[in-house]
Image (tube, rainbow, N blue to C red):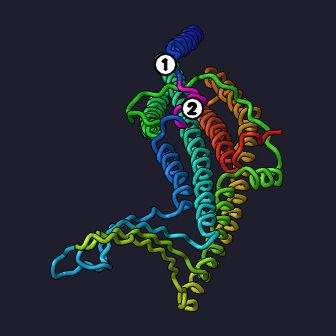
Amino acid sequence: MFSFSIFSSCVSLSLLLLVNNAFAGADHNFLTLKSATEIATQHNPGLAQMRARAEAIAAIPSQVGTLPDPEISVSAANLPVSTFNSAQVDMTQIGPGISQAIPFPGKLTLRSSAATFEAKAALENVTEARWWLLSSVKQVWWQIFYLDHALQVVKDNQLLLEQFIQITRTKYEVGEGLQQDILLAQLELSNLLDQQLKLEGTRRNSVAKLNALLDRAANQPIRLPEEITEELPTIISETALYRLAEHSRALLASKHESINAARARVDLAKKDFYPDFKLRASYGFRRDNPAGIDRDDFLTLGLSMNVPIFLDRKQAKAVDQRNSELMQQKYMLQDEWNNVRAQISQSYSDFQRATEQTILFKTGIIPQAKQTVASMLVGYQVNKVDFLNLVRSQITLLNNELQYWSAFAEANQALANLVAAVGREEIYE
């Protein structure tokens, strides 16, 4: 009778798991990793803001590289204040004028060059922001993936513990079990329910975060595919990743463009040692005198320039300032390059460690833990293993499975960081 009860319990558990999996697979409206990244790049407001800023900066070079607008004027010269009669005095003239400021040759070109380099840097910053947006999306996606599998493991273990309770109760009824075994199983079942509540709460928070990255309502449900490949790729060496990042990372390219812009500003500051010019032209109309004698009109031409007489206190200091800004940009590039290599090394190490853990749990620890649980269950059924050891072995298996999915998710998260740190997808052997 006891063996039949155990057989019935196992059959019931199998049917429950099959039904649960069948209903879980009924909804195919999944958010894949690829679709999540595509939605983010299209709709994320933070990235859109960066694009708009880059477009705004791209409109600057043509503005600063163009001559200032000419000035048009109308003047009345030598007008007698006693009568304000323009025909009374021979020298009275009224007419239009125009003036045009002309910077020293080369200044407009340098201003345009500096702005162009800044526009290129802003565009590289958009690319940099896109890589890290994709990394953030992948990070949260894999976090939800882990939580889904952790919840499934916990629910499966709840069903198993319920079967253990049934088995223990059956043994107790026939005088072969202890009441404290039933209480122990119920306590562990309550602990699993508490763990389930924590995991569900964490999943809701992660879903809200992912929805924010996708520019969707925070409470919009997200369902991930249940079956994905569990194979992790092999990546190239750490040194090779450095070389790729040196030429591919948008952050470094942005700093190079900022250095170019700073050099152009140094050259522009040196141009300020030379004067700027202003051309003027005006035409004066004169009225016929009271006797009817025709008066000639006057044309006035002029050229003026500023005189940089405070060179040591103004222009020379401006050159010093721009040189210091150039050095600042160079130091920033070196600092960012050090940070990039640190990011690559850290992500590379995290990926290797998580990959090794994944292999260890999948091929070694979990199969051994399952064998242990199966052996313990057989021993408990014939009263050769106490219930506490059986429960402990099942808890160990639960923790091992959770650690496996955690390591698998961490490996993929590290891979997402590594791709962003290098600035390109092609990092595999």
Q: Can residue 131 be seen in this view?
A: yes
**Which residue is at a point 49% across and 19% down the rendered structure image?**
166
**Which residue is at a point 42% across and 27% down the rendered structure image?**
221
Q: Is residue 343 left or right of residue 86?
A: right
Residue 113 image offset from top left, x and y in percent? 63, 61
**Which residue is label 2 attached to?**
38
**Which residue is label 1 attached to?**
166
Give the position of the N terminus as an image quadrant. Answer: top right
**Can residue 415 be found in the magenta stretch?**
no
Q: How many marks?
A: 2
Q: Residues within 10 Å of mark 1 (few under 14, many from 20)?
A: some
Residue 339 image offset from top left, x and y in percent? 67, 62
The amino acid pointed to by label 1 is Gln
Q: Is residue 46 above or below residue 113?
A: above
Q: What element carries label 1?
A: helix
Q: Can residue 5 be seen in this view?
A: no
User: Which portion, as a residue range, is magenta?
Assistant: 31-41
Q: For residue 107, which numbered disc appears in the image? A: none
